[in-house]
Image (cartoon, helix red, strand yellow):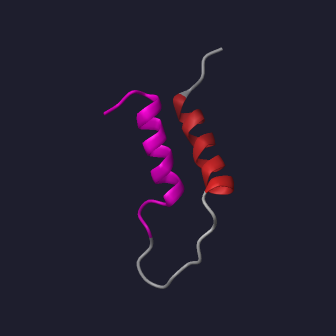
Amino acid sequence: MKTDPDILLTALSVLIDNHVIPAQQRWPGRREKLSDAELVCLALAQVLLGGA
């Protein structure tokens, strides 16, 4: 069975967003370009894929 990295990273992002990082209150002002869950997911993906 071949696993698509996009599906794995999407599932990882959802898992982190729902269970690891608590929901934050929305503050007035500019919207975030990258959520905390997305940032953590990208960092984990970099480690898992062996990037520097």
The quadrant of the image that shows the C terminus is: top left
Residue 20 pos. (x, y %): 63, 54
Query: Which of the 4 image quarters holds residue 51?
Result: top left
Give the residue drawn at x 60%, y 23%. 3
**Magenta span main SS:** helix
Relative to the observer, which residue lies in front, 23 or 4? 23
Looking at the image, residue 14 lies above or below residue 52: below
Residue 32 pos. (x, y %): 44, 68
Which residue lies most toward the bottom here? 28
**35 in the magenta segment:** yes
Q: How many marks?
A: 0
Q: Is residue 19 left or right of residue 36?
A: right
Give the residue drawn at x 56%, y 26%. 4
Give the residue drawn at x 59%, y 34%. 8
Give the residue drawn at x 60%, y 42%. 12
Residue 39 pos. (x, y %): 45, 52
Which residue lies most toward the left here? 52
Looking at the image, residue 13 lies above or below residue 6: below
The quadrant of the image that shows the N terminus is: top right
Looking at the image, residue 13 lies above or below residue 25: above
Q: Is residue 10 left or right of residue 43?
A: right
**29 in the magenta segment:** no
Which residue lies most toward the right here? 19
Residue 37 pos. (x, y %): 54, 54
Which residue lies most toward the top here? 1
| Magenta-highlighted residues | 32-52
